[in-house]
Image: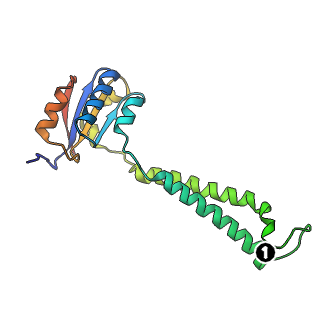
């Protein structure tokens, strides 16, 4: 029986060096833990690869928004210039062969919608703004922005068991292991 308590967010281990954090993250990933996060004063590429959530869907959203923006920009210009308001200005043709003049607006509207979608989806999917997080309850966590390295295994992980996860983290040689309260 899994010992999942709704009163805790997870377990956190503190490490002294970035190498220890990399080794601990690698060991936790190979042990089967998937819902984990790491905190350090600077980015560590090896850790990011281990704790990355995988496919977020943001690239597909941005592509779709860019295509919708470009298509709508082209269609609006076509309707305005050729269907509703067909005036021959400067000898340009009044049919689809006039498409080169529509490229700048088409491009700009595609980029505009793609950029807005990227920014908005990044904020929404990251759960921002988030002025409070349960890891702030851990003693010494303020050191994560200075000189300490932390690995957190969340209680929502399928393998999480309060006693077993704590014992597993202690085998990795941390300075301390803490329970994270909500």
Residue 135's place in the image compared with 78, above or below, is above
Residue 146's place in the image compared with 95, above or below, is above
Observer-nearest of 131 and 101 = 101
Q: How crowded is mark 1: few (under 14 residues within 10 Å), some or many (20 or more)?
A: some
Residue 99: quarter of image: bottom right
Q: Is residue 141 left or right of residue 61?
A: left
| Quadrant occupied by the C terminus | top left
Q: How is the image coloured?
A: rainbow
Q: Position of residue 115 (x, y in %)?
A: 58, 52
**Which residue occupies the extreme bottom position in the image?**
84
Q: Where is residue 127 in the image (x, y as percent from the top left)?
A: 38, 51
The residue lying at 14 percent from left, 47 percent from top is 4
**Which residue occupies the extreme left position in the image?**
1
Q: Where is residue 162 in the image (x, y as percent from the top left)?
A: 13, 40
Residue 88: quarter of image: bottom right
Observer-nearest of 21 and 132 = 21
Q: Mark 1 points at which residue?
A: 82
**Which residue occupies the extreme right position in the image?**
91
Q: In this view, does 29 lie to the left or right of 125?
A: left
The residue lying at 78 percent from left, 74 percent from top is 82
The residue lying at 32 percent from left, 20 percent from top is 17
Quick check: can you spot residue 116?
yes
Q: How many marks?
A: 1
Residue 150's place in the image compared with 87, above or below, is above
Residue 98's place in the image compared with 176, above or below, is below
Residue 15: quarter of image: top left
Q: Is residue 5 left or right of residue 83?
A: left
Asked which secondary structure carries label 1, the reply is helix
The residue lying at 27 percent from left, 28 percent from top is 24
Quick check: can you spot residue 139?
no
Q: Where is residue 171 in the image (x, y as percent from the top left)?
A: 17, 26
């Amino acid at each position: 029986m899994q010992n999942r308590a709704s009163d805790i967010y997870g377990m956190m281990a503190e490490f002294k060096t970035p190498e220890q954090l990399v080794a601990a993250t690698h060991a936790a990933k190979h042990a089967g833990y998937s819902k984990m996060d790491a905190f350090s004063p600077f980015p560590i590429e090896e850790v990011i690869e281990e704790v990355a959530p995988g496919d977020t869907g943001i690239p597909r959203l941005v592509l779709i928004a860019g295509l919708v923006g470009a298509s709508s920009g082209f269609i609006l210009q076509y309707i305005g210039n050729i269907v509703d308001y067909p005036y021959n200005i400067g000898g340009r043709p009044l049919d689809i062969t006039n498409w080169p003049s529509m490229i700048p607006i088409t491009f700009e509207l595609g980029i505009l919608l793609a950029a807005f979608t990227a920014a908005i989806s990044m904020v929404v999917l990251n759960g921002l703004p988030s002025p409070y997080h349960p890891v702030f309850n851990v003693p010494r966590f303020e050191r994560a922005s200075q000189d300490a390295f932390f690995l957190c295994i969340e209680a929502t992980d399928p393998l999480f068991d309060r006693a077993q996860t704590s014992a597993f983290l202690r085998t990795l040689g941390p300075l301390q292991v803490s329970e994270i309260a909500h």
